[in-house]
Structures are given as structure tokens and as C-alpha cells.
Amino acid sequence: MGGGIAQVLALAGHDVRLADVSAEVAASNLERLVTEAGQFVADGLFPEDAVQRIQERITAAESIEEAVSGADFIEEAVPEKIEIKHATLARISAAARPDAVIGSNTSTILIASLATAVERPERFVGVHFSNPAPFIPGVEIIPHEGTDEAILPFVEEIVRATGKQTARVKDSTGFVLNRLQYALFAEASQLVEEGVASASDIDTIVRTTFGFRLPFFGPFAIADMAGLDVYAFCYESLQTRWPERFATPKALQELVDAGKLGTKSGAGFLDVPAERTPELIAYRNKAYVAMQKLLDELGPAPIHSGSEAGA
């Protein structure tokens, strides 16, 4: 993760210093990043001059202290163990400039819990990239209660300059990405355990139905277009088997009771005006056709054997 973040920052024009458990490991990581960038160029994933730009912009530091000295922004991306992160953040904050902004790439640990190891924790914030960092566009920005909100536009500007999209998220275990991701995985696993479908068939259903929509629309936009009254009816049906697990969300019921049924009524979770519905539907249809063309061009993912893929 750290290497991928370094690549995108360098390609955005920033000078980056890598640090790891030793100078040798940092130098080895830099060599790997350059080699990897060359392969990305060959695959058409990075610009033609990416290797040169990465070589010019990224250097390997002798230590954490050397890497952070003089830096404006520092991103911690060590393993997801709080004791390792605490030790690393303590070293970072002790050696960094007092006004340096420090980010953590933690995916699940509370930012407030990590902030206890940081000197001047008001300059500390979660900056959660997703793997693989060069190619996944979303980044969670997670301030803790003590974060100085004045630093957030600075962090967002750095991240957006890499071509990413940022979303501010409150400090809550798992944040948004992993609460949603692991909720889906838990339900999918239960379906396998119950014998409802195989893991392979569940993957097929996810990627060819609601997952097919997700590159273009989030869950609230999808619900608004489907009709919030339809969603309420579906929850009622699920409740005949799992009354607590699929209890109707309060926010959904309140909107339905108020007659706000999504795009067809001009108001819902996102309040898309009714007159924009034809434009939205046209965009949706065009997006889905374009997605299918892309999938046809790429072909199936190399997960199954040739005989299974052709079955």
C-alpha cells in the first residue's frame, strides 16, 4: 500500500521519501516500485514517462526520521496492528516539523486510538487509500474529534491532485468502506453455509446485478431509482424470515411515510428533481451498456480454469 501511494503522489508532482524497517528494505522497495512502474507503462496503465518521473521524485530514506524531516505531509502505512502503528506514529511525530500533517492509511482502527501516539494530534487524520492504491479512485478522509478541521482542505487537495475522489467520514470502527464490504461478505458467507448458492454463483450474481451498477451509483441513488416504496415492500418480505436482521431502516420508512419515494416523486435520499429523471435514466442505460462492452472487451477474469469458464 505504501509503495502504491508513493507512486501516485510522485506522479502528481510531489517529492516523496520512502522509509521502512531498514534502509536496505526501503531501497529494495524503491527498486520494486520502479520495476513495477515499467510494467504498468508496458500494460498501458501508467503514462509513458512514469518510470522517469518516479525515479526523479521518489527516494529511499535511511530511516523514518530522515524521511519525515521537512515533509509537509506524511502518510503512515505500516501493518494493521495498533502497537506497530503507535510506535511508528510516535517516531514520525517526534521527528516531523510541528506543522507537518500526518495521515494514517489504517482501514479499521479508530483514528482517535492512533492519535494517542501522536504529538500535536490535532494535525493527525485518517487518509485511507484502497488496494491497489494506483488504480482505486476512492479515498476516505477521517478526522478524529481532536483533528483541526483547517487541515482537511490541504489533505484533500493533495489526494485529489493524484486523480482520486475523497469523501469525509466520521471516526467509527471500520469507517464506511469496510463496514459495507464486510457486511456484504458476512451475508454472502452465510448464504454459502446455508447451501443457498455456491461461492462462485454468489460472485456471479453480485457482479452481474447490483454490483454491475455500483461503479456509477451508490446504494442511495440505486434505491431512489428503484423506488423507496419498493424497497420498503422488499424489507417486509425479508422480515417474514428474518424480522430483526432485515428490519426496515428508520430513514427509509420515514421517507416512504412522507410520500418521498425517490426519483419518481422528485424526492428521496438524494432529492433528484423529477424533471431530471429522463436525463438520469438515459445516463444509467448508456453507462450499463458501456460497462458491458468493457467487460466483453476484457473477457472473464482469470479465476476459473478454461473448462470451468467455458461451462
Image (cartoon, rainbow, N blue to C red):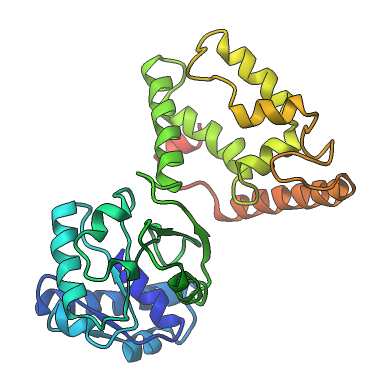
149 relative position to 218: left or right: left
Q: Position of residue 235 (x, y in %)?
A: 62, 19
Depth check, front residue: 115 or 106: 115
Q: In this rendering, is residue 282 above or below 241?
A: below
Residue at the top extreme, as displayed? 240
Q: Position of residue 119 (x, y in %)?
A: 21, 70
Q: In this rendering, is residue 199 above or below 263?
A: above
Q: Residue at x 22, y 66 (%)?
A: 118
Marks counted in the figure total 0
Q: In this rendering, is residue 160 above or below 198?
A: below
70 relative position to 86: left or right: right
Answer whether residue 28 is visible to the viewer in this image.
no
Depth check, front residue: 119 or 241: 119
Q: In this rendering, is residue 206 above or below 67?
A: above
Q: Residue at x 10, y 78 (%)?
A: 24
Q: Position of residue 111 (x, y in %)?
A: 31, 55
